Image: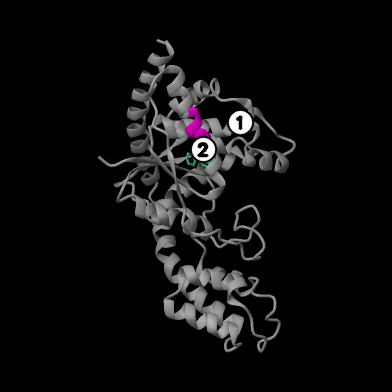
Amino acid sequence: MKKRLFSGIQPSGDVHIGNYLGAIKNWVNLIDNYDCIFCIVDYHAITVDYDPVDMQKRITNAVAVNVAAGLNPERCIIFVQSHVPEHTELAWILNTITPMGHLERMTQFKEKAQQHAANINAGLFNYPVLQSADILLYKAEVVPVGADQVQHIELAREVARKFNMCYGNVFPEPHVILSSAPRIMGLDAKTKMSKSLNNYISLVEPPESIWKKLSVAVTDENRKRRIDPGNPEICNIFALHKHFSTQEQIEWSAKGCRTAGIGCLECKKVLSDNIVKELTPIREKAEKLLNDKDYVLNVLQTGAKKCREIATQTMAEVRAKLGLR
Ligand code: TRP
């Protein structure tokens, strides 16, 4: 029997190449080796201000793009968190064994509280408890995440341990699988690629737009003129070459940069062509899936049904241990 894997996907309207390299591409490989469940975490998304009007569209897009990028719903489960009410039920129970002090230490809470100072709600504070419930509800043993989520998975381990100690053994302690891709920087080369900073290339970005964004992207700032040599290791365009180009092109770009043998624009053009080549099938497939009105709906219905079967079983065990009927 394969071990169970669980991960959460934010319902973002626009999935970018940072998400792709940092998460989705790894997941596609993991599907072979684990029994995989991927959850669109809408209950997490509502802990910060958002527009309810486009929530469903964001969910649908997230599903279509992730499927188009390789998460084949015939080989893994994809579902929406709020379609399985047991997530919040278990989260409530786990709340009662989670020390406030642990939640106060969470870096993501501190950061988000700063960013959203006008809306520091109890849900934002309890966010990691819901995340623990997501994982434990399916007794998942592995959780692929980026470095920023490790602290949350550590909490899930502690919560599992404490539950087992207080009420009897139910949950395995989940392990992190750390994403192997380094942090993908935004086109400004200053901060992590992110939707809110508008420094990204979307997975469904049309070719013209990919080139437009890359042509003004920041490179090694020492290369002010065409004849100035640069250092590829500090150039963000070179960093992207490593993910999208052939070994030969990567060497060509590094050498050309060091010796001023090529210009930045020339180097960007090759990168742009490669990104277009890799993203075009994804964009076309996503468009096709979105045009089929029932496709995403069906994927999510099937996913929710399978998850509820597992979730009801776990909750029956949990309730019995707690002395609830
Ligand atoms: N908090 C995660 C993030 O922001 C998303 C998430 C929610 C998640 N529940 C999860 C990740 C369970 C892994 C497991 O990226």
Give the residue number, with chain letter if any, for mark 2. 154
> Is 29 displayed left or right of 272 in the figure?
left
Magenta stretch prevailing secondary structure:
helix
Q: Is residue 145 above or below residue 270?
A: above
Residue located farthest toward the right when viewing the structure as drawn: 118
The label shown at residue 282 is none
| Nearer to the camera, 117 or 167 | 167
Which residue is at 57% across, 72% downward?
237
In the image, residue 156 lies in the stretch drawn in magenta: yes
Range shown magenta: 153-159
Give the residue number, with chain letter if any, for mark 1. 102
Q: Is residue 291 visible?
A: no
> Tag 1: residue type?
His
In the picture, the quarter occupied by the N terminus is top left
Q: How many marks?
A: 2
Mark 2 lies on a secondary structure that is helix
Q: Is residue 229 visible?
A: yes
